[in-house]
């Protein structure tokens, strides 16, 4: 009888262990791919904490596997289609890598619309998203549309102190509207993803680049440049709009309680927090650059000259949107009003 009790107890313990093991197995394992390296702000301050939060709030039912630097293959320009077509479940990338796919959302990349706070612009994006931007994302499930703090002009040899100094310089453009801005200043834009920039600088393919400090640091850009230029009162020369998105079918397949976990960690629920992470890191990047290079701040007069020329870019964008049957001026006005509201 005693032996039978021991056997029964052992069997029960084994069943319990099996049940607990089965319970610990995730119901959904999602692959998250992005375009930057594992030490980039996007992964360290956003994607890794986000994935951990999702796993914890789902009680382990969702697991997120992160693959940086397009580790699963393909180019940064292809990540949007990877998400849309289900090659990956989740992805983070810059909208500028697929120009024309998200035309409305480019409004926040237009020069001097965003001026320097990612947190403020992120909240502005949430304000106008449903009315003005949502049509850009019909074929994917956007979790967050956001920006970084904004671009300084990094140069290898030439110190820029006036609009005239930019004339003829070959500068890396992060997006098509960034290229238009450089053209309006008389520079020669060279478009490329940021992972290609270090080689382009070292070989003299470009004389400099539009890039934020927080991105410049992990790519060793301070080692290849002497100057970093920004506008009066820290004004930046545009920004990039990023998408963090999910394949629609993967999201739709989730039960309602797990959809809620995703939703609770999306959109306006995280927009300010993520912006503040970017804003906090940018000054640290400036401090690192200042140890080997010179930080240059343009005068108010010269900053106004850069902005006046860049108005041509906004006019060009509005005309292009109007040709598509979209009221571009209304989107620009809404974006500026939302940024002004959150700047108070």
Image (cartoon, helix red, strand yellow):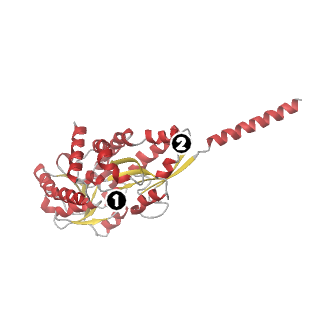
Count how many numbered circles sit on residues in the image: 2
Classify 10 Å Cα crowding around label 1: few (below 14), some (14-19), many (20 and above).
some
Q: On the image, numbered disc 1 is attached to which residue?
A: 101
Please state if 116 lies on the left or on the right of 26 as rendered: left
Identify the secondary structure beneath mark 1: loop
- Expressed as whole percent of the image width and height from the top left, the position of residue 27 reads 59, 45
Q: Nearer the viewer, residue 31 or 68?
A: 31
- Give the distance between the C-alpha atoms of the residues marked 2 and 1, in whole angstroms: 30 Å
Find residue 199 and report its image quarter: bottom left
Classify 10 Å Cα crowding around label 2: few (below 14), some (14-19), many (20 and above).
few
In the current view of this chain or complex, which residue is farthest to the left?
Answer: 301
Query: Residue at position x 17%, y 62% from top?
Result: 184
Decide if residue 59 is in sight here: yes
Decide if residue 155 is in sight here: no
Q: On the image, numbered disc 2 is attached to which residue?
A: 255
Identify the secondary structure beneath mark 2: loop
Picture quarter with the N terminus: top right
Query: Residue at position x 36%, y 40% from top?
Result: 268
- Expressed as whole percent of the image width and height from the top left, the position of residue 311 reads 16, 55
């Amino acid at each position: 009888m005693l032996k039978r009790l021991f056997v029964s107890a052992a069997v029960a313990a084994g069943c319990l262990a099996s049940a607990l093991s089965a319970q610990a197995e995730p119901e959904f394992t999602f692959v998250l791919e992005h375009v930057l390296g594992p030490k980039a702000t996007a992964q360290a301050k956003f994607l890794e904490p986000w994935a951990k939060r999702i796993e914890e709030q789902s009680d382990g039912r969702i697991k997120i596997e992160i693959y940086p630097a397009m580790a699963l293959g393909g180019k940064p320009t292809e990540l949007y289609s990877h998400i849309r077509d289900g090659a990956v479940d989740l992805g983070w990338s810059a909208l500028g890598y697929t120009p024309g796919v998200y035309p409305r959302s480019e409004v926040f990349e237009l020069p001097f619309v965003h001026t320097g706070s990612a947190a403020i612009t992120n909240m502005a994006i949430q304000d106008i998203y449903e009315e003005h931007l949502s049509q850009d994302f019909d074929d994917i499930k956007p979790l967050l549309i956001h920006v970084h703090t904004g671009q300084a002009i990094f140069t290898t040899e030439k110190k820029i102190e006036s609009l005239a100094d930019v004339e003829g310089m070959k500068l890396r453009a992060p997006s098509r509207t960034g290229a238009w801005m450089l053209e309006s200043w008389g520079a020669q834009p060279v478009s490329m993803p940021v992972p290609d920039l270090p080689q382009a600088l070292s070989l003299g393919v470009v004389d400099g680049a539009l890039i934020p400090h927080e991105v410049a640091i992990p790519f060793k850009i301070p080692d290849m440049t002497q100057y970093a230029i920004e506008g009066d009162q820290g004004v930046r020369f545009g920004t990039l709009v990023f998408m963090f998105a999910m394949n629609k079918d993967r999201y739709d397949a989730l039960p309602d309680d797990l959809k809620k976990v995703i939703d609770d960690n999306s959109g306006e629920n995280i927009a300010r927090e993520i912006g503040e992470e970017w804003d906090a890191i940018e000054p640290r990047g400036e401090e690192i650059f200042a140890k080997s290079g010179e930080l240059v701040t343009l005068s108010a007069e010269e900053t106004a000259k850069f902005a006046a020329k860049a108005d041509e870019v906004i006019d060009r964008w509005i005309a292009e949107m109007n040709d598509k049957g979209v009221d571009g001026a209304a989107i620009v006005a809404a974006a500026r009003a939302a940024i002004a509201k959150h700047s108070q």
